[in-house]
Image (cartoon, coloured by chain):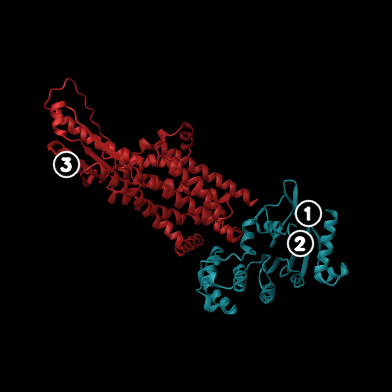
Chain colours: A cyan, B red
Amino acid sequence: MTKKFGSFTANDNLNFEVGKGEIFGFLGANGAGKTTSIKILCGLSVPTSGEIEVAGYDVYKQAEIIKKNIGYMSQKFSLYEDLTVWENIRFYAGIYGMPIKTIKSKATILLKRLELEHARNKLIASLPLGWKQKLAFSIAIFHEPSIVFLDEPTGGVDPITRRQFWDMIYEAANKDITVFVTTHYMDEAEYCHRISIMVDGRIEAIDTPANLKKQFETDSIENVFIKLARQSNFKG
Amino acid sequence: MKRFFGFIKKEFFHIFRDKRTMLILFGMPIIQILLFGYVVTNEIKDAEIAILDLSKDDISQEITNKLSSSGYFQIKKVLHSHTEIEDVLKSGIIKEVVVFEADFAKKIEREGIANIQLIADASDANTANLIVNYTKGIISNYAISLRKDVEMPLQIEPEIRMFYNEELKGAFMFVPGTMALILMLISAMMTSISIAREKELGTMEVLLVSPLRPFQIIIGKVSPYIAMAFVNAVVIIAMGVFVFNMPVLGSISLLMLESLLFIVMALALGIFISTVSNSQQVAMFISLFALLLPTMLLSGFIFPIENMPLVLQWLSSIIPPKYFIIIIKNVMLKGTGISFVWKETLVLLGMTVFFILLSVKKFKVRLE
Protein backbone atom coordinates (compact mmCIF):
# COMPACT_ATOMS: atom_id res chain seq x y z
CA MET A 1 0.00 0.00 0.00
CA THR A 2 1.41 3.35 -1.02
CA LYS A 3 0.01 6.83 -0.54
CA LYS A 4 1.62 9.94 -1.94
CA PHE A 5 0.64 13.57 -1.43
CA GLY A 6 2.42 15.29 -4.30
CA SER A 7 6.10 14.49 -3.80
CA PHE A 8 5.63 13.51 -0.16
CA THR A 9 5.22 9.80 0.48
CA ALA A 10 3.04 9.28 3.56
CA ASN A 11 2.83 5.50 3.25
CA ASP A 12 5.78 3.90 1.50
CA ASN A 13 4.98 0.41 0.25
CA LEU A 14 3.34 -0.93 3.42
CA ASN A 15 2.86 -4.66 3.41
CA PHE A 16 1.07 -6.47 6.21
CA GLU A 17 -1.63 -8.94 7.05
CA VAL A 18 -3.81 -9.09 10.14
CA GLY A 19 -5.59 -12.30 11.16
CA LYS A 20 -9.18 -12.64 12.29
CA GLY A 21 -9.69 -11.91 15.98
CA GLU A 22 -6.20 -10.49 16.28
CA ILE A 23 -5.36 -7.35 18.25
CA PHE A 24 -2.96 -5.50 16.00
CA GLY A 25 -1.10 -2.51 17.40
CA PHE A 26 -0.13 0.16 14.92
CA LEU A 27 2.63 2.27 16.43
CA GLY A 28 4.63 5.20 15.20
CA ALA A 29 5.70 8.72 16.09
CA ASN A 30 3.45 11.65 15.17
CA GLY A 31 3.56 12.15 11.42
CA ALA A 32 4.83 8.63 10.72
CA GLY A 33 1.78 7.93 8.59
CA LYS A 34 -0.51 5.98 10.95
CA THR A 35 -3.59 8.10 10.43
CA THR A 36 -3.14 8.06 6.65
CA SER A 37 -3.10 4.26 6.64
CA ILE A 38 -6.18 4.02 8.86
CA LYS A 39 -7.99 6.46 6.61
CA ILE A 40 -7.22 4.35 3.56
CA LEU A 41 -8.34 1.15 5.28
CA CYS A 42 -11.61 2.81 6.37
CA GLY A 43 -12.32 4.14 2.92
CA LEU A 44 -11.86 7.81 3.88
CA SER A 45 -8.88 8.13 1.59
CA VAL A 46 -7.90 6.52 -1.70
CA PRO A 47 -4.47 4.83 -1.94
CA THR A 48 -2.06 5.85 -4.69
CA SER A 49 -1.22 2.24 -5.45
CA GLY A 50 -1.22 -1.24 -3.96
CA GLU A 51 -3.52 -4.20 -3.41
CA ILE A 52 -5.63 -3.85 -0.31
CA GLU A 53 -8.30 -6.06 1.16
CA VAL A 54 -10.26 -5.26 4.29
CA ALA A 55 -12.33 -8.04 5.85
CA GLY A 56 -11.72 -9.98 2.65
CA TYR A 57 -13.14 -7.27 0.38
CA ASP A 58 -11.30 -5.21 -2.19
CA VAL A 59 -10.85 -1.54 -1.20
CA TYR A 60 -11.28 -0.27 -4.75
CA LYS A 61 -14.28 -2.29 -5.85
CA GLN A 62 -16.16 -3.23 -2.71
CA ALA A 63 -15.84 -0.11 -0.59
CA GLU A 64 -19.55 -0.14 0.27
CA ILE A 65 -19.47 -3.72 1.57
CA ILE A 66 -16.37 -2.91 3.59
CA LYS A 67 -18.13 0.01 5.23
CA LYS A 68 -20.85 -2.30 6.53
CA ASN A 69 -18.26 -4.61 8.04
CA ILE A 70 -16.04 -2.18 9.91
CA GLY A 71 -16.36 -0.08 13.02
CA TYR A 72 -14.41 3.08 13.75
CA MET A 73 -13.64 5.07 16.85
CA SER A 74 -11.45 8.14 16.88
CA GLN A 75 -9.64 9.82 19.73
CA LYS A 76 -12.48 12.32 19.97
CA PHE A 77 -14.94 9.53 20.94
CA SER A 78 -17.42 10.99 18.44
CA LEU A 79 -20.64 10.80 20.42
CA TYR A 80 -23.27 13.52 20.14
CA GLU A 81 -23.11 15.50 23.36
CA ASP A 82 -26.63 16.85 23.03
CA LEU A 83 -28.21 13.44 22.56
CA THR A 84 -28.86 10.93 25.33
CA VAL A 85 -27.04 7.62 25.68
CA TRP A 86 -29.98 5.74 24.17
CA GLU A 87 -30.40 8.23 21.32
CA ASN A 88 -26.73 7.87 20.42
CA ILE A 89 -26.99 4.09 20.37
CA ARG A 90 -30.18 4.19 18.32
CA PHE A 91 -28.75 6.70 15.86
CA TYR A 92 -25.47 4.90 15.18
CA ALA A 93 -27.09 1.47 15.07
CA GLY A 94 -29.76 2.96 12.80
CA ILE A 95 -27.30 4.19 10.19
CA TYR A 96 -25.96 0.64 9.97
CA GLY A 97 -29.50 -0.47 9.15
CA MET A 98 -30.14 -2.51 12.30
CA PRO A 99 -33.84 -3.13 13.01
CA ILE A 100 -35.20 -1.21 15.99
CA LYS A 101 -36.16 -4.38 17.93
CA THR A 102 -32.63 -5.72 17.78
CA ILE A 103 -31.26 -2.32 18.77
CA LYS A 104 -33.54 -2.18 21.80
CA SER A 105 -32.74 -5.62 23.13
CA LYS A 106 -29.00 -5.30 22.47
CA ALA A 107 -28.90 -1.84 24.04
CA THR A 108 -30.51 -3.15 27.24
CA ILE A 109 -27.88 -5.88 27.55
CA LEU A 110 -25.09 -3.45 26.74
CA LEU A 111 -26.14 -0.83 29.28
CA LYS A 112 -26.47 -3.50 31.95
CA ARG A 113 -22.97 -4.75 31.23
CA LEU A 114 -21.51 -1.23 31.29
CA GLU A 115 -23.52 -0.49 34.46
CA LEU A 116 -24.98 2.52 32.68
CA GLU A 117 -28.67 1.59 32.99
CA HIS A 118 -29.42 4.63 35.14
CA ALA A 119 -27.83 6.91 32.51
CA ARG A 120 -29.89 5.62 29.59
CA ASN A 121 -31.76 8.90 29.22
CA LYS A 122 -28.96 11.21 30.29
CA LEU A 123 -27.19 13.50 27.84
CA ILE A 124 -23.70 12.40 26.83
CA ALA A 125 -22.43 15.82 27.91
CA SER A 126 -23.16 14.90 31.53
CA LEU A 127 -21.09 11.69 31.51
CA PRO A 128 -17.47 11.42 32.70
CA LEU A 129 -14.79 10.92 30.06
CA GLY A 130 -14.13 7.26 30.89
CA TRP A 131 -17.78 6.33 30.39
CA LYS A 132 -17.96 8.20 27.12
CA GLN A 133 -14.94 6.28 25.89
CA LYS A 134 -16.36 2.88 26.84
CA LEU A 135 -19.69 3.78 25.34
CA ALA A 136 -18.04 5.03 22.14
CA PHE A 137 -16.20 1.73 21.80
CA SER A 138 -19.34 -0.29 22.47
CA ILE A 139 -21.18 1.71 19.84
CA ALA A 140 -18.32 1.21 17.35
CA ILE A 141 -18.78 -2.60 17.65
CA PHE A 142 -22.56 -2.52 18.21
CA HIS A 143 -23.34 -3.61 14.65
CA GLU A 144 -20.92 -6.55 15.05
CA PRO A 145 -18.29 -5.56 12.46
CA SER A 146 -15.52 -7.98 11.55
CA ILE A 147 -12.87 -5.29 12.09
CA VAL A 148 -12.85 -2.28 14.36
CA PHE A 149 -10.37 0.55 13.85
CA LEU A 150 -9.37 2.46 16.98
CA ASP A 151 -7.43 5.66 16.40
CA GLU A 152 -5.68 6.53 19.68
CA PRO A 153 -8.69 5.46 21.73
CA THR A 154 -7.17 6.06 25.15
CA GLY A 155 -6.02 9.67 24.82
CA GLY A 156 -6.60 11.69 27.98
CA VAL A 157 -8.05 8.79 30.00
CA ASP A 158 -6.78 7.74 33.44
CA PRO A 159 -4.77 4.46 33.85
CA ILE A 160 -7.56 2.53 35.60
CA THR A 161 -10.08 3.32 32.88
CA ARG A 162 -7.46 2.46 30.27
CA ARG A 163 -7.01 -0.93 31.91
CA GLN A 164 -10.78 -1.52 31.86
CA PHE A 165 -10.87 -0.37 28.26
CA TRP A 166 -8.31 -2.97 27.27
CA ASP A 167 -10.44 -5.62 28.96
CA MET A 168 -13.22 -4.60 26.61
CA ILE A 169 -10.86 -4.86 23.64
CA TYR A 170 -9.91 -8.42 24.65
CA GLU A 171 -13.57 -9.28 25.02
CA ALA A 172 -14.22 -8.03 21.48
CA ALA A 173 -11.25 -10.00 20.14
CA ASN A 174 -12.63 -13.13 21.81
CA LYS A 175 -15.79 -12.64 19.78
CA ASP A 176 -13.60 -12.83 16.66
CA ILE A 177 -13.63 -9.08 16.01
CA THR A 178 -10.30 -7.99 14.64
CA VAL A 179 -8.98 -4.95 16.51
CA PHE A 180 -6.71 -2.54 14.68
CA VAL A 181 -5.45 0.00 17.20
CA THR A 182 -3.05 2.93 17.14
CA THR A 183 -1.64 4.23 20.37
CA HIS A 184 1.03 6.40 21.91
CA TYR A 185 1.20 4.44 25.13
CA MET A 186 3.96 1.86 24.92
CA ASP A 187 2.60 -0.15 27.84
CA GLU A 188 -0.56 -0.65 25.78
CA ALA A 189 1.53 -1.98 22.92
CA GLU A 190 2.47 -4.90 25.16
CA TYR A 191 -1.20 -5.90 25.35
CA CYS A 192 -1.40 -6.40 21.57
CA HIS A 193 -1.00 -9.78 19.93
CA ARG A 194 1.18 -8.27 17.26
CA ILE A 195 2.51 -4.80 16.63
CA SER A 196 4.04 -2.88 13.79
CA ILE A 197 6.20 0.20 14.21
CA MET A 198 6.11 2.84 11.50
CA VAL A 199 8.93 5.29 10.89
CA ASP A 200 8.77 7.89 8.13
CA GLY A 201 5.99 6.16 6.23
CA ARG A 202 7.60 2.71 6.31
CA ILE A 203 6.99 -0.28 8.56
CA GLU A 204 10.35 -0.84 10.25
CA ALA A 205 9.33 -3.69 12.51
CA ILE A 206 6.39 -6.05 12.65
CA ASP A 207 6.08 -9.02 15.04
CA THR A 208 4.78 -10.06 18.45
CA PRO A 209 5.92 -7.81 21.31
CA ALA A 210 8.02 -10.66 22.75
CA ASN A 211 9.85 -11.35 19.49
CA LEU A 212 10.55 -7.66 18.92
CA LYS A 213 12.09 -7.31 22.35
CA LYS A 214 14.30 -10.31 21.60
CA GLN A 215 15.25 -9.00 18.18
CA PHE A 216 16.27 -5.58 19.50
CA GLU A 217 17.82 -7.03 22.65
CA THR A 218 15.89 -4.95 25.08
CA ASP A 219 13.27 -5.46 27.79
CA SER A 220 10.46 -3.14 26.73
CA ILE A 221 8.65 -2.03 23.59
CA GLU A 222 9.44 1.53 24.57
CA ASN A 223 13.14 0.85 24.00
CA VAL A 224 12.44 -0.86 20.69
CA PHE A 225 10.54 2.22 19.64
CA ILE A 226 13.30 4.59 20.74
CA LYS A 227 15.95 2.58 18.89
CA LEU A 228 13.94 2.71 15.68
CA ALA A 229 13.15 6.40 16.08
CA ARG A 230 16.87 7.17 16.56
CA GLN A 231 17.69 5.44 13.28
CA SER A 232 15.26 7.74 11.59
CA ASN A 233 16.86 10.79 13.20
CA PHE A 234 20.33 9.76 12.07
CA LYS A 235 19.14 9.47 8.52
CA GLY A 236 17.29 12.74 8.67
CA MET B 1 -34.72 5.27 3.71
CA LYS B 2 -35.24 4.37 7.37
CA ARG B 3 -31.60 5.22 8.06
CA PHE B 4 -32.18 8.55 6.46
CA PHE B 5 -35.16 9.36 8.69
CA GLY B 6 -33.13 8.43 11.74
CA PHE B 7 -30.56 10.92 10.57
CA ILE B 8 -33.10 13.71 10.13
CA LYS B 9 -34.57 12.96 13.54
CA LYS B 10 -31.13 13.34 15.08
CA GLU B 11 -30.72 16.65 13.30
CA PHE B 12 -33.99 17.93 14.74
CA PHE B 13 -32.79 16.95 18.22
CA HIS B 14 -29.71 19.12 17.66
CA ILE B 15 -31.87 22.04 16.63
CA PHE B 16 -34.53 21.77 19.32
CA ARG B 17 -32.08 21.17 22.17
CA ASP B 18 -29.89 24.15 21.44
CA LYS B 19 -31.44 27.32 22.81
CA ARG B 20 -29.26 29.58 20.70
CA THR B 21 -30.20 27.77 17.52
CA MET B 22 -33.87 27.99 18.44
CA LEU B 23 -33.54 31.69 19.16
CA ILE B 24 -31.86 32.35 15.83
CA LEU B 25 -34.40 30.21 14.00
CA PHE B 26 -37.58 31.56 15.48
CA GLY B 27 -36.89 34.68 17.52
CA MET B 28 -34.68 36.52 15.11
CA PRO B 29 -36.94 36.60 12.05
CA ILE B 30 -39.78 38.15 14.01
CA ILE B 31 -37.56 40.65 15.81
CA GLN B 32 -35.79 41.62 12.61
CA ILE B 33 -38.91 42.21 10.64
CA LEU B 34 -40.45 44.30 13.41
CA LEU B 35 -37.22 46.24 13.74
CA PHE B 36 -36.90 46.94 10.07
CA GLY B 37 -40.57 47.58 9.66
CA TYR B 38 -41.03 49.97 12.55
CA VAL B 39 -37.70 51.38 13.61
CA VAL B 40 -35.40 51.51 10.64
CA THR B 41 -37.82 53.32 8.42
CA ASN B 42 -37.44 56.22 6.06
CA GLU B 43 -41.03 57.36 6.09
CA ILE B 44 -42.42 60.19 8.18
CA LYS B 45 -45.24 59.40 10.53
CA ASP B 46 -46.37 61.64 13.38
CA ALA B 47 -43.09 63.60 13.41
CA GLU B 48 -43.15 65.89 16.42
CA ILE B 49 -42.93 69.57 15.54
CA ALA B 50 -43.41 72.90 17.28
CA ILE B 51 -45.13 76.03 15.99
CA LEU B 52 -44.02 79.59 16.67
CA ASP B 53 -46.82 81.76 15.36
CA LEU B 54 -45.94 85.45 15.71
CA SER B 55 -48.90 86.51 13.61
CA LYS B 56 -51.84 84.40 14.83
CA ASP B 57 -54.13 85.14 11.92
CA ASP B 58 -56.48 83.06 9.76
CA ILE B 59 -53.89 81.99 7.24
CA SER B 60 -51.19 80.96 9.70
CA GLN B 61 -53.84 79.08 11.64
CA GLU B 62 -55.03 77.30 8.53
CA ILE B 63 -51.53 76.22 7.55
CA THR B 64 -51.00 74.92 11.06
CA ASN B 65 -54.19 72.89 10.76
CA LYS B 66 -53.11 71.50 7.39
CA LEU B 67 -49.82 70.37 8.91
CA SER B 68 -51.42 68.67 11.88
CA SER B 69 -54.13 66.96 9.84
CA SER B 70 -51.71 65.59 7.25
CA GLY B 71 -50.82 62.57 9.37
CA TYR B 72 -47.13 63.27 8.95
CA PHE B 73 -46.84 65.71 11.80
CA GLN B 74 -47.91 66.00 15.36
CA ILE B 75 -47.83 69.45 16.88
CA LYS B 76 -46.28 68.84 20.23
CA LYS B 77 -45.60 72.39 21.38
CA VAL B 78 -46.74 75.92 20.72
CA LEU B 79 -43.92 78.41 21.29
CA HIS B 80 -44.15 82.10 22.10
CA SER B 81 -40.71 83.51 21.36
CA HIS B 82 -37.53 82.84 19.40
CA THR B 83 -35.58 82.14 22.55
CA GLU B 84 -37.52 78.93 23.11
CA ILE B 85 -36.56 77.44 19.74
CA GLU B 86 -33.12 76.23 20.67
CA ASP B 87 -34.31 74.68 23.92
CA VAL B 88 -37.01 72.55 22.32
CA LEU B 89 -34.68 71.39 19.55
CA LYS B 90 -32.02 70.49 22.09
CA SER B 91 -34.50 68.46 24.06
CA GLY B 92 -34.54 66.12 21.03
CA ILE B 93 -38.28 65.52 21.05
CA ILE B 94 -39.06 68.26 18.55
CA LYS B 95 -37.72 67.56 15.07
CA GLU B 96 -38.74 70.82 13.42
CA VAL B 97 -39.96 74.28 14.36
CA VAL B 98 -42.25 76.19 11.96
CA VAL B 99 -42.04 79.94 12.42
CA PHE B 100 -44.66 82.33 10.97
CA GLU B 101 -43.40 85.92 10.81
CA ALA B 102 -45.43 88.71 12.35
CA ASP B 103 -48.26 90.14 10.21
CA PHE B 104 -48.20 87.01 8.06
CA ALA B 105 -51.67 87.35 6.50
CA LYS B 106 -51.36 91.10 6.08
CA LYS B 107 -48.10 90.78 4.19
CA ILE B 108 -49.63 88.26 1.83
CA GLU B 109 -52.50 90.60 1.13
CA ARG B 110 -50.40 93.69 0.68
CA GLU B 111 -47.13 92.46 -0.85
CA GLY B 112 -48.16 89.01 -2.10
CA ILE B 113 -45.26 87.51 -0.22
CA ALA B 114 -44.75 86.35 3.33
CA ASN B 115 -42.15 84.20 5.05
CA ILE B 116 -42.25 80.95 6.94
CA GLN B 117 -39.06 79.79 8.56
CA LEU B 118 -38.41 76.04 8.94
CA ILE B 119 -35.82 75.09 11.53
CA ALA B 120 -35.05 71.38 11.56
CA ASP B 121 -32.95 69.21 13.81
CA ALA B 122 -30.33 68.02 11.34
CA SER B 123 -28.45 65.82 13.78
CA ASP B 124 -30.31 63.15 11.83
CA ALA B 125 -29.79 64.64 8.39
CA ASN B 126 -32.00 62.23 6.45
CA THR B 127 -35.01 62.68 8.66
CA ALA B 128 -34.49 66.46 8.72
CA ASN B 129 -34.49 66.52 4.93
CA LEU B 130 -37.62 64.43 4.71
CA ILE B 131 -39.49 66.50 7.29
CA VAL B 132 -38.55 69.77 5.63
CA ASN B 133 -39.61 68.45 2.23
CA TYR B 134 -42.94 67.22 3.52
CA THR B 135 -43.58 70.56 5.22
CA LYS B 136 -42.66 72.48 2.09
CA GLY B 137 -45.00 70.30 0.09
CA ILE B 138 -47.96 71.00 2.35
CA ILE B 139 -47.27 74.72 2.48
CA SER B 140 -46.85 75.12 -1.28
CA ASN B 141 -50.03 73.14 -1.89
CA TYR B 142 -51.82 75.62 0.31
CA ALA B 143 -50.15 78.56 -1.42
CA ILE B 144 -51.40 77.31 -4.77
CA SER B 145 -54.93 77.03 -3.45
CA LEU B 146 -54.71 80.66 -2.24
CA ARG B 147 -53.76 81.79 -5.72
CA LYS B 148 -56.66 79.90 -7.34
CA ASP B 149 -58.87 82.98 -7.34
CA VAL B 150 -56.14 85.05 -8.92
CA GLU B 151 -55.74 84.60 -12.67
CA MET B 152 -52.42 82.86 -13.33
CA PRO B 153 -50.71 83.18 -16.72
CA LEU B 154 -49.48 79.60 -17.17
CA GLN B 155 -49.25 77.00 -14.56
CA ILE B 156 -47.92 73.49 -14.91
CA GLU B 157 -48.46 71.28 -11.97
CA PRO B 158 -46.99 67.79 -12.07
CA GLU B 159 -49.19 65.25 -10.41
CA ILE B 160 -47.08 62.56 -8.91
CA ARG B 161 -48.12 59.01 -8.26
CA MET B 162 -45.82 56.42 -6.76
CA PHE B 163 -46.91 53.21 -8.42
CA TYR B 164 -46.84 49.89 -6.54
CA ASN B 165 -46.19 51.62 -3.26
CA GLU B 166 -48.40 54.70 -3.41
CA GLU B 167 -47.82 55.73 0.13
CA LEU B 168 -44.04 55.12 -0.03
CA LYS B 169 -44.28 52.67 2.80
CA GLY B 170 -40.90 51.60 4.11
CA ALA B 171 -42.16 48.19 5.12
CA PHE B 172 -42.78 47.32 1.48
CA MET B 173 -39.06 47.77 0.92
CA PHE B 174 -37.97 46.00 4.04
CA VAL B 175 -40.10 42.87 3.97
CA PRO B 176 -38.50 41.40 0.84
CA GLY B 177 -35.04 42.45 2.03
CA THR B 178 -35.52 41.01 5.49
CA MET B 179 -36.82 37.83 3.99
CA ALA B 180 -33.71 37.48 1.84
CA LEU B 181 -31.53 38.23 4.85
CA ILE B 182 -33.20 35.74 7.16
CA LEU B 183 -33.42 32.93 4.66
CA MET B 184 -29.76 33.47 3.85
CA LEU B 185 -28.86 33.42 7.52
CA ILE B 186 -30.84 30.33 8.41
CA SER B 187 -30.04 28.34 5.34
CA ALA B 188 -26.44 29.20 4.64
CA MET B 189 -25.08 30.11 8.05
CA MET B 190 -26.89 27.54 10.15
CA THR B 191 -26.15 24.63 7.82
CA SER B 192 -22.52 25.57 7.40
CA ILE B 193 -22.17 25.80 11.17
CA SER B 194 -23.95 22.53 11.81
CA ILE B 195 -21.82 20.65 9.29
CA ALA B 196 -18.66 22.27 10.63
CA ARG B 197 -19.71 21.18 14.13
CA GLU B 198 -19.75 17.53 13.07
CA LYS B 199 -16.26 17.98 11.70
CA GLU B 200 -15.08 19.65 14.87
CA LEU B 201 -16.52 16.92 17.11
CA GLY B 202 -15.08 14.15 14.94
CA THR B 203 -18.52 12.69 14.32
CA MET B 204 -18.23 13.49 10.61
CA GLU B 205 -15.44 10.91 10.29
CA VAL B 206 -17.60 8.26 11.93
CA LEU B 207 -20.47 9.12 9.59
CA LEU B 208 -18.20 8.93 6.56
CA VAL B 209 -16.87 5.53 7.66
CA SER B 210 -20.46 4.27 8.03
CA PRO B 211 -22.47 2.85 5.13
CA LEU B 212 -24.21 6.22 4.71
CA ARG B 213 -23.18 7.83 1.45
CA PRO B 214 -21.78 11.37 1.55
CA PHE B 215 -24.76 12.79 -0.29
CA GLN B 216 -27.12 11.14 2.19
CA ILE B 217 -25.20 12.74 5.04
CA ILE B 218 -25.40 16.15 3.40
CA ILE B 219 -29.08 15.89 2.48
CA GLY B 220 -29.82 14.62 5.98
CA LYS B 221 -27.99 17.60 7.45
CA VAL B 222 -29.73 20.22 5.33
CA SER B 223 -33.30 19.00 5.00
CA PRO B 224 -34.39 20.08 8.51
CA TYR B 225 -33.13 23.53 7.66
CA ILE B 226 -35.14 23.59 4.43
CA ALA B 227 -38.23 23.00 6.55
CA MET B 228 -37.24 25.64 9.11
CA ALA B 229 -36.37 28.23 6.49
CA PHE B 230 -39.62 27.58 4.68
CA VAL B 231 -41.64 28.06 7.87
CA ASN B 232 -39.80 31.34 8.32
CA ALA B 233 -40.55 32.46 4.78
CA VAL B 234 -44.25 31.88 5.45
CA VAL B 235 -44.08 33.71 8.79
CA ILE B 236 -42.34 36.71 7.24
CA ILE B 237 -44.82 36.98 4.38
CA ALA B 238 -47.71 36.60 6.82
CA MET B 239 -46.29 39.35 9.01
CA GLY B 240 -45.81 41.57 6.00
CA VAL B 241 -49.43 41.05 5.03
CA PHE B 242 -51.09 41.20 8.44
CA VAL B 243 -48.86 43.61 10.36
CA PHE B 244 -47.70 45.95 7.63
CA ASN B 245 -50.65 45.56 5.25
CA MET B 246 -48.39 44.58 2.44
CA PRO B 247 -50.31 43.27 -0.55
CA VAL B 248 -49.62 39.97 -2.26
CA LEU B 249 -50.88 40.73 -5.75
CA GLY B 250 -49.18 37.85 -7.54
CA SER B 251 -49.64 34.13 -7.17
CA ILE B 252 -48.85 32.80 -3.71
CA SER B 253 -47.64 29.48 -5.04
CA LEU B 254 -45.16 31.26 -7.29
CA LEU B 255 -43.97 33.25 -4.28
CA MET B 256 -43.51 30.04 -2.30
CA LEU B 257 -41.72 28.26 -5.13
CA GLU B 258 -39.33 31.17 -5.57
CA SER B 259 -38.67 31.22 -1.83
CA LEU B 260 -37.95 27.50 -1.92
CA LEU B 261 -35.54 28.01 -4.80
CA PHE B 262 -33.74 30.73 -2.86
CA ILE B 263 -33.58 28.52 0.24
CA VAL B 264 -32.05 25.65 -1.73
CA MET B 265 -29.57 28.08 -3.28
CA ALA B 266 -28.57 29.35 0.16
CA LEU B 267 -28.23 25.78 1.46
CA ALA B 268 -25.94 24.89 -1.41
CA LEU B 269 -23.90 27.95 -0.53
CA GLY B 270 -23.87 26.86 3.13
CA ILE B 271 -22.63 23.39 2.18
CA PHE B 272 -19.91 24.98 0.09
CA ILE B 273 -18.85 27.17 3.02
CA SER B 274 -18.72 24.14 5.29
CA THR B 275 -16.41 22.32 2.89
CA VAL B 276 -13.86 25.11 3.17
CA SER B 277 -14.08 25.58 6.94
CA ASN B 278 -13.07 23.12 9.61
CA SER B 279 -14.55 24.79 12.67
CA GLN B 280 -17.83 26.36 13.60
CA GLN B 281 -16.18 29.72 14.14
CA VAL B 282 -14.60 29.83 10.71
CA ALA B 283 -17.93 28.83 9.17
CA MET B 284 -19.68 31.59 11.07
CA PHE B 285 -17.22 34.30 10.13
CA ILE B 286 -17.23 33.33 6.48
CA SER B 287 -21.03 33.38 6.52
CA LEU B 288 -21.15 36.75 8.24
CA PHE B 289 -18.65 38.51 6.04
CA ALA B 290 -19.31 36.82 2.75
CA LEU B 291 -23.08 36.59 3.03
CA LEU B 292 -24.74 38.87 5.54
CA LEU B 293 -22.89 42.10 4.85
CA PRO B 294 -23.28 41.90 1.07
CA THR B 295 -26.92 40.94 1.54
CA MET B 296 -27.48 44.03 3.67
CA LEU B 297 -25.40 46.48 1.66
CA LEU B 298 -25.22 45.36 -1.95
CA SER B 299 -28.46 43.56 -2.70
CA GLY B 300 -30.58 46.67 -3.00
CA PHE B 301 -32.09 45.92 0.39
CA ILE B 302 -31.07 49.21 2.00
CA PHE B 303 -29.25 51.15 -0.69
CA PRO B 304 -30.65 51.34 -4.22
CA ILE B 305 -28.36 49.54 -6.67
CA GLU B 306 -28.77 52.30 -9.29
CA ASN B 307 -27.08 54.81 -6.98
CA MET B 308 -23.99 52.68 -6.41
CA PRO B 309 -20.64 53.25 -8.12
CA LEU B 310 -20.30 51.08 -11.23
CA VAL B 311 -17.86 48.62 -9.63
CA LEU B 312 -20.26 47.94 -6.77
CA GLN B 313 -23.09 47.55 -9.26
CA TRP B 314 -21.12 44.78 -10.98
CA LEU B 315 -20.42 43.24 -7.60
CA SER B 316 -24.08 43.34 -6.70
CA SER B 317 -24.98 41.25 -9.72
CA ILE B 318 -23.14 38.24 -8.30
CA ILE B 319 -25.06 38.53 -5.06
CA PRO B 320 -27.94 36.06 -5.04
CA PRO B 321 -30.30 38.02 -2.74
CA LYS B 322 -30.42 40.83 -5.30
CA TYR B 323 -32.34 38.58 -7.67
CA PHE B 324 -34.53 37.19 -4.95
CA ILE B 325 -35.51 40.69 -3.81
CA ILE B 326 -36.36 41.68 -7.37
CA ILE B 327 -38.53 38.58 -7.76
CA ILE B 328 -40.32 39.04 -4.45
CA LYS B 329 -41.05 42.71 -5.12
CA ASN B 330 -42.37 41.92 -8.55
CA VAL B 331 -44.62 39.14 -7.40
CA MET B 332 -45.88 40.80 -4.24
CA LEU B 333 -46.21 44.43 -5.25
CA LYS B 334 -46.74 44.33 -9.00
CA GLY B 335 -48.49 41.00 -9.22
CA THR B 336 -46.37 39.89 -12.13
CA GLY B 337 -46.09 36.25 -13.10
CA ILE B 338 -43.16 34.05 -14.01
CA SER B 339 -43.00 35.61 -17.49
CA PHE B 340 -41.58 38.78 -15.93
CA VAL B 341 -39.15 37.21 -13.49
CA TRP B 342 -37.93 34.19 -15.43
CA LYS B 343 -34.53 35.78 -15.97
CA GLU B 344 -33.93 36.29 -12.26
CA THR B 345 -35.30 32.83 -11.53
CA LEU B 346 -32.89 31.37 -14.05
CA VAL B 347 -29.97 33.21 -12.45
CA LEU B 348 -30.89 31.79 -9.03
CA LEU B 349 -31.28 28.33 -10.53
CA GLY B 350 -27.89 28.62 -12.19
CA MET B 351 -26.27 29.73 -8.93
CA THR B 352 -27.85 26.78 -7.11
CA VAL B 353 -26.46 24.28 -9.60
CA PHE B 354 -23.09 26.00 -9.52
CA PHE B 355 -22.76 25.83 -5.73
CA ILE B 356 -23.96 22.23 -5.58
CA LEU B 357 -21.40 21.15 -8.19
CA LEU B 358 -18.69 23.13 -6.43
CA SER B 359 -19.41 21.53 -3.05
CA VAL B 360 -19.61 18.04 -4.52
CA LYS B 361 -16.20 18.60 -6.07
CA LYS B 362 -14.75 20.01 -2.84
CA PHE B 363 -16.23 17.17 -0.83
CA LYS B 364 -14.60 14.59 -3.09
CA VAL B 365 -11.22 16.30 -2.98
CA ARG B 366 -11.38 16.19 0.78
CA LEU B 367 -12.05 12.46 0.74
CA GLU B 368 -8.89 11.85 -1.26
Badge 3 and badge 1 both on one subunit: no
Whether callout 2 and callout 3 share a subunit is answered no
Residue hosting label 2: A28
Q: Is residue B3 visible?
A: yes
Chain letter, disc 1 residue:
A
Q: Amino acid at mark 3?
A: Asn
Would residue A12 appear left or right of B27 to someone viewing this image? right
Q: Position of residue A96 (x, y in %)?
A: 57, 64
Residue that mark 3 sits on:
B65
Instruction: State how far apart marks 2 and 3 are (Cα).
Output: 90 Å
Nearer mark to the viewer, of 2 and 3: 3
Look at mark 1 in the image and give the residue it sits on: A13
Q: Residues within 10 Å of mark 1 (few under 14, many from 20)?
A: some
For the residue pair A133 and B46, the one nearer the viewer reads as B46
Does any portion of residue B334 appear in the rendered image?
no
How would you rate the neighbour count of disc 2 (Cα within 10 Å): few for under 14, some for 14-19, many for 20 or more? many
Are the residues at dot 1 and dot 2 in contact (C-beta closer than 8 Å)? no
> Badge 3: few (under 14), some or many (20 or more) residues near its Cα, within 10 Å?
few
* Residue B298: quadrant of the picture: top left
Q: Pointer 2 indicates a residue of which chain? A: A
Location of residue B239 in the rendering, given as x and y in whole percent from the top left corner: 31, 51
Check disc 3 and report its element: helix, strand or loop.
helix
